[in-house]
Image (tube, rainbow, N blue to C red):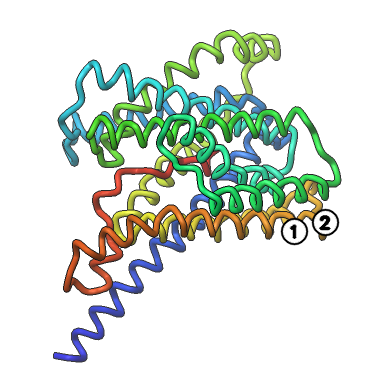
Amino acid sequence: MEERKKSKEWMEGAITYFYLLFYIAISSGQIFFNKWVLSSKDINFPYPVALTLLHMVFSSIVCFLITKVFKVMKVEEGMTSEIYLTSVVPIGAMFAMTLWLGNSAYLYISVAFAQMLKAIMPVAVFLLGAAAGLEELSGRMFVIMSIISIGVVVASIGEVTISWVGVVYQMGGVIAEALRLIFIEIFLKKKGVRLNLISMMYYVSPCSALCLFVPWIFLEKPKMDSSGSWNFPPLTLFLNCMCTFILNLSVFLVISRTSALTARVTGVVRDWVVVLLSAAIFADTKLTFINIIGYGIAIAGVVAYNNHKLKPASHSVNSQAGGINSNSQEKDPGVQIPLSTKASS
């Protein structure tokens, strides 16, 4: 009996670590895949809005097939026209902006430097959250924000070839993602609506696609028309869209299997993997000692931020759980997609 119990625990642990490793692999791979599609001379598809639009259209179609045609999952109820207009539309618009601007940055800066700039995300989220009344100012948070900011500045100083156009795109994507997270927090806390990943994607993806269609018509379609016949590699773009969708599912699996804290820590590990691998893969990536020191400082601040933010939630879960075992305490099935497919940006 004891051996069977240990075997079951070992199997559960192995499955959990498999999900974590799969998330790191698929999210890292998606970043490199996007960079390759947008920048490779072999693919020659330098259209970030079009690529992101394809991602959203693909997600919309797959979610429709899953929920309405094959009925594998049901779309959760509770959505009204008022909630859709005041919550889903802003979330979808900011999601579209995040992916558009983030993908555009890859045309000008390296993957490694883009990841370093993304470390400033907690600062943007905190400042916008404080402005919206969702965050409380404190001395500890000020110190953490300062550490992250200093780290990103130091990492930027160490960048060998810096494109300010790429930096502006990336920082615009960071601000859009921070706004998206703020809207989601308002959506969950004040509106009281909680959706699983498929339901969230079912509502958000079409809205994001529509938001992307307008800039594509005016900004990229004329360029694509003037370049003659579109270089549109269908199999490559289909696989790219499929990887994006699988990435979204992997986020859901990680959160539902473990906790939001584990997902965030795994994201930090993923960022380091991306930075180091990009230096080995891409010729435009040259890491300097100052780069690494600055990014290390920023990541230390990000870890401190995650720990500070998630401690109250952890204490709340523990106090409610009582005598439940540690594995049950860590699981957080009520967390409804606070993370995003920013890895696809």
> Residue 83, position in %: x, y?
26, 22
Residue at 42 percent of width and 16 percent of height? 210
> Residue 204, position in %: x, y?
35, 27
Residue at 24 percent of width and 38 percent of height? 194
**Quadrant of image for the N terminus:** bottom left
Give 330 or 343, whichever is nearer the viewer.
330
The mark found on residue 288 in the picture is 2
> Residue 167, position in %: x, y?
72, 34
**Quadrant of image for the C terminus:** top right
On screen, residue 286 versus residue 89, left or right, reads right
> Residue 67, position in %: x, y?
21, 33
Badge 1 density bin: few <14, some 14–19, many ≥20, Cα 10 Å: many
Residue at 48 percent of width and 55 percent of height? 306
User: In terms of secondary structure, where does tag 2 sit?
Assistant: loop
Residue at 46 percent of width and 35 percent of height? 129
- Residue 99 to residue 295: above or below: above
Badge 2 density bin: few <14, some 14–19, many ≥20, Cα 10 Å: some
Q: Identify the amino acid type marked 2.
A: Thr
The mark found on residue 240 in the picture is none
User: In terms of secondary structure, where does tag 1 sit?
Assistant: helix
- Residue 233 to residue 256: above or below: above
Q: Identify the amino acid type marked 1.
A: Ile
Give 45 or 291, whichever is nearer the viewer.
291
Q: Are marks 2 and 1 in contact (CB under 8 Å)?
A: yes
Q: Which residue does the numbered mark 1 point to in the structure image? A: 292
On screen, residue 177 versus residue 320, left or right, reads right
Asked whether residue 58 is in view, the answer is yes
Give 246 or 16, whichever is nearer the viewer.
16
